[in-house]
Image (spheres, rainbow, N blue to C red):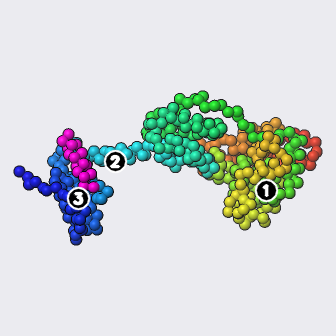
Amino acid sequence: MPKRVPELSPSAVKNARPRATAWKLADGKGLFLLVLPDGAKQWRFKYRRPDTGKENLLALGNYPDVSLSKARERRAEVRALLADGIDPGEQRKAERQARKEAAGSTFAAVASDWLAVQNCADVTLRKSRWILESFLLPEIGHLPLSDISPRVLLDALRKIEATGKQETAKRAKIKAGQVFRWAIMEGRTEIDPTGALRGALKSTKAKHHASITDPAKIGELLRAIEGYTGDPVTCAALRLAPLVFVRPGELRAAQWQEIDLVGAVWRIPGERMKLGAAHIVPLSSQAVALLRGLQPLTGSGRYVFPGMRTASRHMSENTINAALRRLGYGTDEMTGHGFRSMAASRLNEMGWNADAIERQLAHAESNKVRDAYTHAAQYLDERARMMQAWADYLDALRAGGDVVAFRRKAG
């Protein structure tokens, strides 16, 4: 008959002192206190595995966080498992793995992994992160994907709607769908709840960027820009915008290293483009002259259009629109983005190759050579002729003469 081990007293546990080597204080039925040389005291439970009979140890916590009475309660729990043929050590491993998998399957964890593999322009990535972190993660970030039903997601989206941000709610739904569909492809979930939410959000009226397309009014705008008396860098950006008609963010963040004034070309790398594909902007002689005039002012820095407060950052997002407001053009008349609509409308009416116009607007994305300029160089010779003709046309409009719509020359 095995020798009965006397039970420990709370005072014996409290007063146990460290020695040169670790030593044990037994409480019986497999429970003992391990006293380490550094003074730490750890509860351990010794048992034999039900399947192999091999001796094993299970940690039950540290003293004094786990008192003697609490350690005995935990001993009783694991002894009950053993009586049912369950190995408490293996069960603990399974529970730990389940918690790990659950943590890795939350919407926040999966969204983070999805963001990490996105190959898109920095501005697009920032917008995706902003929508996720500002609107979705606070509501559903902690939930495993399997727990996010259409109803749960809809509740989160309607909270965004309730603040008047209907367009943001739609974008959040789109972003959630992108995360879920990626997770399905990665084998991390099986269902995309956004599919059941079609038509569930309030419809919004399509918003178009205000733009001036009437030739006479374009001339008035160009003369107003020429007379702008504000910051010279802002003035240069205003004057260059209609000549290159890139997206406002691409213009504001233009870098001198991207611009070849001798070759009269501006090469924008894919990471700065909305669609992630590199882009080439042929520069008219007017655009080159404008940039040469600006070079003594900002050419020693990184950005063509640095911010007003610091040259280490590019021009702020609202600068161009604020300048247009200062010139007397309201938000319903003209915007920085409106220069693109202006060029697209007039160039199409004037007979230029629609594909060349679309390529110059960077509307088409390359699926094969995103990091090369092969796709960006499509129709490049024709686009260079078009950009020069467009600049000449704008000059004529600015001069206030009667301008006959020019047509693309054959050949």
Q: SS at mark 3? A: helix
Residue 10 tag number: 3
What's the residue type where badge 3 is placed? Pro
Where residue 175 sits, quadrant-wise, is top right
How far across and how far down the image is residue 166, in percent? 64, 36
Residue occupying image coordinates x 50% and y 48%: 112
State whether residue 384 appears in this view.
no
In this view of the protein, which residue sits in the foreground, 82 or 216?
82
Q: Earlier in the sequence, mark 1 or mark 2?
A: 2
Residue occupying image coordinates x 16% and y 55%: 7
Q: Which residues are magenta?
A: 67-85
Is there a contact, CB below 8 Å, between mark 2 and mark 3? no
Q: SS at mark 2? A: helix
How far across and how far down the image is residue 87, in percent? 23, 45
Q: Kindly report the secondary structure that dominates the magenta region of the rendered protein.
A: helix
Residue occupying image coordinates x 27% and y 55%: 67
Where residue 171 sits, quadrant-wise, is top right
Where residue 22 sits, quadrant-wise, is bottom left
Reply yes or no: does residue 69 show up in magenta. yes
How far across and how far down the image is residue 192, in percent? 50, 34
Looking at the image, the residue that sits furthest to the left is: 1
Q: Which residue position holds label 1?
A: 234
Q: Is residue 154 above or below residue 90?
A: above
Q: Earlier in the sequence, mark 3 or mark 1?
A: 3
Residue 96 tag number: 2
